Amino acid sequence: MSVKKKVLSVYLSSLLAFVAMTAVSLPVGAVGNGPNTGNGSIQTSILHTYESLVDYLKTQDHKQEAMELEVIGQTVKGRDIYMAKYISNPENPTILFLTQQHGNEQLTTEGALEFIKHLGTNKTKVVLDNVNVLIIPMLNADGAMGDVNFSLEDYLADGDRHLTRYNANNVDLNREHDKATKEMEPEARVLHENVFEKYTIDYMIDLHHQGTESQTNGELVSGSILYPTNLNVKPEVLEASKQLGSVVYHSIEDTGWGHIGKYNGGSGENIGRNGAAVRYDISTLLFEMRGMSDHYYESYALGQKSNGYLIKQTITTLDATVRAISDGSIKKADISFWDTLPTQTNRSNEEADE
């Protein structure tokens, strides 16, 4: 292991251990309210690179008997796109966790990688008997590495690279999902051909990041959620999507350190949560974490002081949903909270798209 990878591993392990010890004592809204926009440097060098992510996945694949690592296809620049699979019984309900359709939204990836390691412990052995889990931790690897065919000179982050929303062809992958499969960008195409069409997926959480200034009732949110809103979504798919949202909402809001709002998102089938629900009858949930890893708008990017909380929020989300599907409690989840969950507004004039 290189010195850089050792430093990264120690940093993330220490950070998560600290968060785990202190999260219970944090005041309500601590995640959403700190630090303020523009405070703290944005250091991309502490995030996994594509290469270190691949090494991490291969290490976990070697250690974990229940895990299988699959390459679902390649990016524009030829990078393999990996999916971690936990399939104990094809008849089990299956959930897909998707991160980094947008390459500059990486803290959910950091959380997903920690969750993959968590799935290799005895704490989840019985859980995985009753649920299948698919995790794509970095769909847009070219954007995450800043290896693109356009300039990133206006991006704000410090470190060893910039990260961009778009793929190498300057295309938003989360606007591809209503196209004929063969007409999609390579990353979206293989997601459809080799995941959506290959596996019977019941649930999907599409993990993203938004700007830093979204709020409800004057309080900054730590994240926001939304079910599919396209009119062509079947009622039973919509209800299960709202149940998925209920599990996520209560797992975060009840901690005392998270604050969740309702995302103000579009209804087009080109958006992942809508397209997957309409096209494949997958019950979907968008989760937008606060703050991006890099951007050219200062109010979108958030300094590294918030990294620990947002990584923890991702892990909590993934763990809660897997357990709720495994024990069947998701089927009884109360969706009435959606009726009163405030839709977030933005303190600035800049709105982040999912």
Image: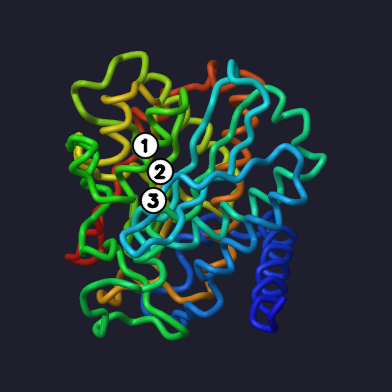
Q: Is residue 200 left or right of residue 274?
A: right
Q: Dot 1: what SS?
A: loop
Q: Crowdedness of circle 1 by 10 Å Cα count: few (<14), some, many (20+)?
A: some
Q: CA distance from mark 2 to mark 1?
A: 20 Å
* Residue found 54% across the figure and 74% down from its top: 305
In this rendering, is residue 304 above or below 210?
A: below
Q: Position of residue 11 (x, y in %)?
A: 67, 74
| Residue 91 seen | yes
The image quadrant where one finds the N terminus is: bottom right
The circle drawn on residue 288 is 3
Q: Quadrant of residue 17?
A: bottom right
Q: CA distance from mark 3 to mark 1?
A: 15 Å
Q: Residue furthest front?
A: 78
* Residue found 56% across the figure and 76% down from its top: 46
Task: Please tell me which of labels 3 and 2 falls first in the chain.
Answer: 2
| Residue 219 seen | no
The circle drawn on residue 206 is 2
